[in-house]
Image (spheres, helix red, strand yellow):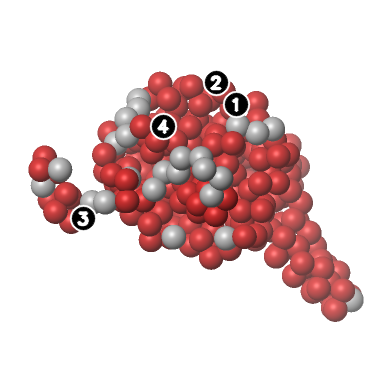
Amino acid sequence: MLSRSLKMAFWVSYDHIGKLLIANLIWAIAITLPGVFALTAFNTGEPSIMLLAGAPFLYLSLGVVGAILTAGLAHMVKVLIETGDGSLNDLLDGIKQYWLRAWAIGTLFFIVIGALTTSAWFYGTQVGANIPWVGYAAGALAVWMLVFVLLCAVLVMPTLVQKRAPVFATLKLTAVLVIDNPLLTIGIAIQWAALLALSIVMIPVFFGLYGAACVVISSCAYEMLSRKYAAAAADGAPIRRDEDDDYLNRGFRDFLFPWKG
């Protein structure tokens, strides 16, 4: 399923590279502006500045702006997958439709990830120094919970825009998908991590590719999952089949000679 998701992601990106580049640039600039202030505050090393300035700007960057624009990107990619066409207006439509729920989800993830990261450090270093077995066990539990939450972050925005459900229903479904499809989710997370590493080494990759590429990969993975569960349900409803999907039925020839498709 991972290979099919990546194949679909490649062709979605190939067909719509121009609008995805512009959408990614908007996404990257929007989260970078408050992110720079957050990084500056954290670089001071002063606990008070880090807490009073760094944390709020980091929350604004990732928990608010990043979450809302990622939901807009997910909606745009959803349209591209389902119709084979779309525009930057779909990004704006997604923001209008999902901004409040995306903000709530971003806030919850920001709080939980921050709490679990702090817990892992506290139990592993502070408690572990005095009561090793308690500290290390609690720290390990916090780490595993943190990994699970990060895996959920990979699929949460495609889940939101596909199901159009309330916040907690979206989170519940996302958790179920991760638990039921751990290898796919881990595979997608590895792609995200590889793109992040590339973006750190080559900053232009972040502004030109990173956000849109991650959302395209996750959205295509969600599309594969939706087909899997639709086929399993077999309730007579129409199913989008791989053999009828143009994105999944191309080869190297289509890459070299797109006009012959």
Q: CA distance from mark 4 to mark 2?
A: 15 Å
Q: CA distance from mark 4 to mark 1?
A: 17 Å
- The answer to whether the residues at label 1 and label 2 have Cβ atoms under 8 Å apart is yes
In this orientation, which residue lies closer to the viewer: 57 or 105?
105
Q: Point out the tag, 2 or 3, that comes first from the N-terminus.
A: 2
Q: Position of residue 96 (x, y in %)?
A: 55, 21
Q: CA distance from mark 1 to mark 3?
A: 37 Å
Q: Label 4 is placed on what type of residue?
A: Val
Tag nearer the camera, 1 or 3: 3
Q: Provide the residue designation for mark 2.
A: 96
Q: Position of residue 151 (x, y in %)?
A: 60, 56
Q: Label 1 is placed on what type of residue?
A: Trp
Q: CA distance from mark 1 to mark 2?
A: 6 Å
Left or right for 99, reference 236:
right
Does dot 1 land on a helix, a strand or a loop? helix
- The answer to whether the residues at label 4 and label 2 have Cβ atoms under 8 Å apart is no
Tag nearer the camera, 2 or 3: 3
Q: Which mark is residue 99?
A: 1
Q: Provide the residue designation for mark 4.
A: 79
Q: Point out the tag, 4 or 1, that comes first from the N-terminus.
A: 4
Q: Point out the tag, 4 or 2, that comes first from the N-terminus.
A: 4
Callout 3: few (<14), some (14-19), or many (20+) C-alpha neighbours within 10 Å? few
Q: Is residue 109 visible?
A: no
